[in-house]
Amino acid sequence: MRKPAGQARPRQPALPLRERAMPWLKLSAQAALLLALSGALSWGITWLREPQNMPLRSVQIEGEFRKLGAGQLQTAVAGAVRGGFFSVNVDQVRRAVETLPWVASATVRRVWPDQLQVQVVEQRAAARWGDAGLLNMRGELFEPDAASIPQRLPRLAGPDELRRRVMERYIEMTDLLAPIGRRVAELRVDERRAWLLRLDNGIELRLGRDDTLARLDRFVRVYPTRFAAHAATLQAVDLRYSNGIAVRWDRSPIAAGQQQEG
């Protein structure tokens, strides 16, 4: 049976006030808890960052050193360490250590609960560059104190933008010379990209601009039979010719006497 039109629907019973307020009370409690946790976390971080609460007790420096002294490493670290275990800036400490010329790289990390560990890799000088510079095997330039520079290193020279290329060529030529027992004493490339090589026994090799490794290989192949016995009087070999070489001998009486004695 249809209800007469206009008849009012029965009203739902009203919820008690406590039940209506319950969702808001829960939200308020969660917000208060979150606020308390945030405050506690903020306080904890602030407390941990106070140096007197978590101080650093020791700094350990590790690595294999030939040129680096313990004193200069400790001074560099001490000048950069600020704060406690959590607040110390490890990147700042690393950068301070890497400012030392003989440092190739450094790694700094925290060791729980109160130690800082500094791992240092020392530069390995492969050759001299100019008057005061050194190159490592990657052709990277560093300039240490003059007193710490090894004196017997080969000398490389050329335009600054060719440092890496000169080092690469030095390594290649060192390998080529190994069978005849000779080493590179000096290697230069000029602005025209022409190469000049001086061996450890004083012989100068002019290699020109092109096919330098092939030209050096040609010298290495003929050296045992043509030049080894007369190396004391051999001054220079020009290898820039396609069908031969030009040789300059030392004809002085002193050189001739040395050759006879040999």
Image (cartoon, helix red, strand yellow):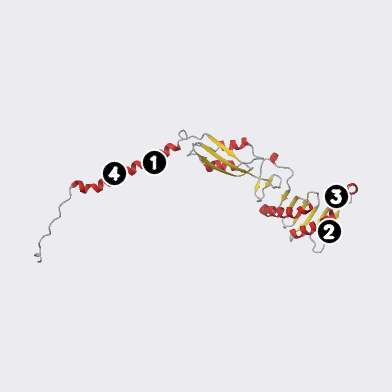
Q: Which residue is drawn at 82% across and 54% down?
A: 236
Whether 27 is drawn above or below 224: the answer is: above
Q: Give the mark, 4 or 2, whose residue is nearer the N terminus.
A: 4
Q: Which image quadrant is residue 40 in?
A: top left
Q: Give the mark, 1 or 2, whose residue is nearer the N terminus.
A: 1
- Label 4 neighbour load within 10 Å: few <14, some 14-19, many 20+: few
Q: What element carries label 3?
A: helix
Between the C-alphas of marks 1 and 2, the distance is 81 Å
Q: Is 32 situated left or right of 149 in this image?
A: left
- Label 1 neighbour load within 10 Å: few <14, some 14-19, many 20+: few
Q: Where is residue 70 in the image (x, y as percent from the top left)?
A: 62, 36
Q: Give the mark, 4 or 3, whose residue is nearer the N terminus.
A: 4
**Pointer 4 residue:** 29
- Label 3 neighbour load within 10 Å: few <14, some 14-19, many 20+: many
**Pointer 2 residue:** 246
**Pointer 3 residue:** 232
Quadrant in which the N terminus is drawn: bottom left
Q: Give the mark, 3 or 2, whose residue is nearer the N terminus.
A: 3
Q: Give the mark, 3 or 1, whose residue is nearer the N terminus.
A: 1
Q: Where is residue 254 in the image (x, y as percent from the top left)?
A: 89, 46
Between the C-alphas of marks 3 and 1, the distance is 80 Å
Asked whether 199 or 1 is in front, the reply is 1
Q: Where is residue 128 in the image (x, y as percent from the top left)?
A: 71, 47
**Pointer 1 residue:** 41
